[in-house]
Image: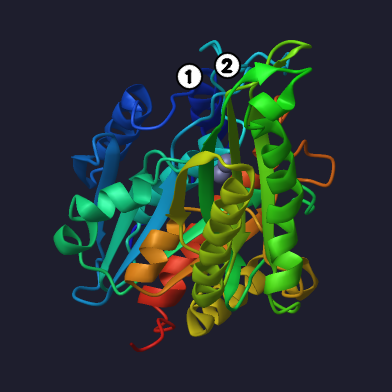
């Protein structure tokens, strides 16, 4: 058996910094995706490009012959953020930035692919999934619609996210909900503009909008069982631009997050009721667009135990947190883990790391070799040591 070629830290950093310098946003990750495919091919993997446009899937078959099939997934897209870091590898694309660390996720999965391709000491098949457009645009759903699981059948799929606030060398595993479902809404209230000194001649959109801004978040505390987490935030209000005119139109936007699908449907219904009632009260027309965006990410418990075991061997028992509450942020890996058993873990990006989506965020290079080891040890645990839970 050949020995494993582990990518050197300098090599991993080189890939990561190159991705960081050239961030690309949803479905426009052409350079990133071409570089990923080129590296994978150079190590002899079977590479499929073009899933959901810029998605890449690489297939590696084990040297021990037939066996189960798994997927390892990284997201490759950046954000519409202007970088404020003064580092040599800072973004060269104005207004775009890897502020969520997907440059690091891509690099760690490439490192895992390289190590496993050099010594595929397992039975079965690994699919390395490089997914576009995680931020807002649902690239995971687009890959599935483009035939991800039909073209590449797999029994389970795994992913990870770097986690600011957790020390490097620690991880968190949830045996159940890990990331919330995500709805977005926008609504336009149309009344009758008038002189601010004669409001009785108009229909007041601004007063109605302000009532909604206070009423809608209160739906969570009044309509929901208190032990089920949910959050609703109105994030934008636009309308009016001077002292003495009541605006004809006001627009509101915001988001709702929760974990339970029945709860989600109920909140949406009560939201619609509240908006309609407020519009009637003030004699306004309302146009409402309430949309389910990502489902909740729910880890499959038996698979989560396998991941926690691999991480315990890698990092030590005290460095694998099992007690953290799930995040109210969302993740489109949910579409993949709805289609087959899945686990999404967090790996520490450092206690002093800027938060995700902050213009001073940077992926921590010290996490790179740990992520590579996790992918390799997880694969060997599942496909060599027989730890893959039975369906
Ligand atoms: Zn993000
Ligand atoms: Zn992210």
Picture quadrant where residue 196 is located: top right
- Callout 1: helix, strand or loop? loop
Mark 2 surroundings: few (<14), some (14-19) or many (≥20) residues within 10 A: many
Q: Quadrant of the C terminus?
A: bottom left
Residue drawn at (64%, 66%) of the image? 314
Residue 326: x and y in percent read 67, 66
Q: Are marks 1 and 2 in contact (CB under 8 Å)?
A: yes
| Residue 112 showing in the rendered view | no
**In the orientation shown, which residue stands out farthest toward the left?**
151
> Which of the two labelled residues, at mark 1 and mark 2, occupies the earlier sequence position?
1
Q: Position of residue 126 (x, y in %)?
A: 30, 62
Please give left or right for residue 359 compared with residue 341 in the image. right
From the viewer's side, name the closer residue of 66 and 160. 160
Q: Does any portion of residue 183 appear in the rendered image?
A: yes
x and y, in percent, of residue 199 in the image? 73, 26
Residue 91 — which label? Answer: 2
What numbered label is drawn on residue 204?
none
Q: Which quadrant of the figure shows ligand 1?
A: top right
């Amino acid at each position: 058996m050949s020995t494993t070629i582990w990518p050197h830290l300098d090599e991993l950093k080189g890939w990561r910094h190159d991705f960081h310098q050239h961030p690309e946003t949803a479905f426009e990750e052409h350079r990133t995706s071409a570089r990923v495919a080129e590296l994978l091919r150079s190590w002899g993997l079977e590479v499929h490009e073009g899933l959901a446009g810029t998605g890449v899937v690489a297939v590696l078959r084990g040297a021990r012959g037939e066996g189960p099939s798994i997927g390892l997934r990284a997201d490759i897209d950046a954000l519409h953020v202007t970088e404020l870091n003064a580092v040599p590898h800072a973004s060269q694309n104005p207004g775009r930035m890897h502020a969520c660390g997907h440059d690091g996720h891509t690099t760690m999965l490439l490192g895992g692919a390289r190590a496993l391709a050099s010594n595929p000491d397992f039975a079965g098949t690994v699919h390395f999934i490089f997914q576009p457009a995680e931020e807002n645009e649902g690239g995971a759903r687009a890959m599935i619609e483009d035939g991800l699981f039909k073209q590449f059948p797999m029994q389970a799929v795994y992913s990870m996210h770097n986690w600011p606030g957790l020390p490097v060398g620690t991880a968190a595993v949830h045996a159940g909900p890990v990331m919330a479902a995500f709805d977005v809404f926008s609504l336009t209230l149309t009344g009758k503009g008038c002189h601010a000194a004669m409001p009785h001649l108009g229909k007041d959109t601004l007063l109605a909008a302000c009532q909604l801004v206070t009423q809608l978040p209160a739906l969570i505390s009044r309509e929901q069982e208190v032990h089920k987490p949910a959050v609703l935030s109105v994030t934008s209000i636009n309308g009016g631009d001077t002292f003495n005119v009541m605006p004809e139109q006001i627009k509101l936007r915001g988001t709702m997050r929760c974990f339970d699908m029945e709860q989600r449907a109920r909140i949406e219904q009560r939201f619609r009721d509240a908006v309609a009632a407020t519009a009637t009260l003030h004699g306004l027309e309302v146009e409402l667009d309430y949309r389910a965006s990502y489902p909740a990410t729910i880890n499959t418990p038996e698979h989560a135990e396998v991941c926690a075991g691999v991480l315990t061997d890698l990092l030590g028992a005290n460095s694998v947190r099992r007690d953290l509450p799930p995040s109210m942020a969302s993740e489109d890996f949910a579409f993949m883990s709805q289609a087959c058993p899945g686990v999404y873990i967090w790996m520490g990006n450092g206690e002093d790391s800027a938060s995700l989506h902050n213009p001073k965020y940077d992926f921590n290079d010290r996490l790179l070799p740990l992520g590579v080891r996790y992918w390799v040890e997880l694969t060997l645990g599942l496909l060599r040591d027989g730890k893959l839970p039975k369906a």
